[in-house]
Amino acid sequence: TEVLGDKTGQVCGLRLVRTEVGLPDKGHRPYLIQRGTEFDIETDWVIPALGFDPLPCPQTDEEETPALNDWGGIVVDHHQMTSIPGVFAVGDLVRGPSLMLHSVRDARKAAEQIDAYLAAKANTGQQA
């Protein structure tokens, strides 16, 4: 319901609310807000994932930024890892506008690869 910012205007979290699927209305099922279920989560970035036109990855002043393709999407390998070791990406920011099915499939693959990456780091005693 809201993007939260700190005193400097930097993103610091999201305020969310739980929903439930309502009764069908004119061919679609609306989502109904469950009152009193608001909660906040901390985050450093918020990347919009709505719409049909590709949006470029936001640029940062950080030393490491992921490799981008010609339209500004994040480039990933076959494990969904970006050019920054240990940073994974999925969804429209990688594919451009696509089916949600593709994003879910890629997210599952990324979750498996993140687990494998962290397990390998743990086995070698390196920090992730």
Image (cartoon, rainbow, N blue to C red):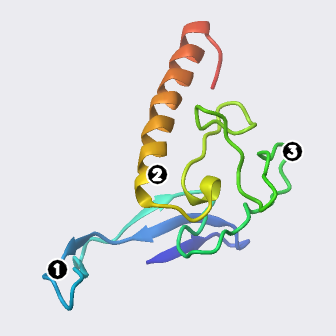
Amino acid type indicated by mark 3 = Glu
The N terminus sits in image quarter: bottom left
Q: In what element is the residue under mark 3?
A: loop
Which label's residue is closer to the chain start, 2 or 1? Answer: 1
Amino acid type indicated by mark 2 = His
Circle number at residue 22: 1
Category of crowding for the residue at label 3, using alpha-carbon neighbours closer than 10 angstroms: few (below 14), some (14–19), many (at least 20): few
Query: Is there CB contact under 8 Å for labels 2 and 1?
Result: no
Q: Is residue 19 left or right of residue 66?
A: left
Placement of 83 over or under 89, stated as above or below:
above
Which label's residue is closer to the chain start, 3 or 1? Answer: 1
Q: Is residue 17 left or right of residue 43?
A: left
Q: Is residue 65 left or right of residue 54?
A: right
Placement of 88 over or under 51, stated as above or below:
above
Q: Which residue is mark 3?
A: 63
Placement of 64 over or under 31, stated as above or below:
above
Tell me residue 114's x, y (percent).
Answer: 52, 31
Q: Which residue is found at the position 61% from the left and 40% from the top?
A: 88
Q: Which residue is found at the position 70% from the left and 73% from the top?
A: 9
Amino acid type indicated by mark 1 = Gly
Q: Nearer the viewer, residue 65 or 37?
A: 65
Q: Give the Cα distance between marks 3 and 1.
A: 46 Å
Q: Quadrant of residue 87?
A: top right
Residue farthest top in this picture: 124
Tell me residue 109's x, y (percent).
Answer: 47, 36
Q: Is residue 32 left or right of residue 1?
A: left
| In front: label 3 or label 2 | 2
Q: Nearer the viewer, residue 95 or 9?
A: 95
Q: How many marks?
A: 3
Q: Which residue is mark 2?
A: 102
Category of crowding for the residue at label 1, using alpha-carbon neighbours closer than 10 angstroms: few (below 14), some (14–19), many (at least 20): few
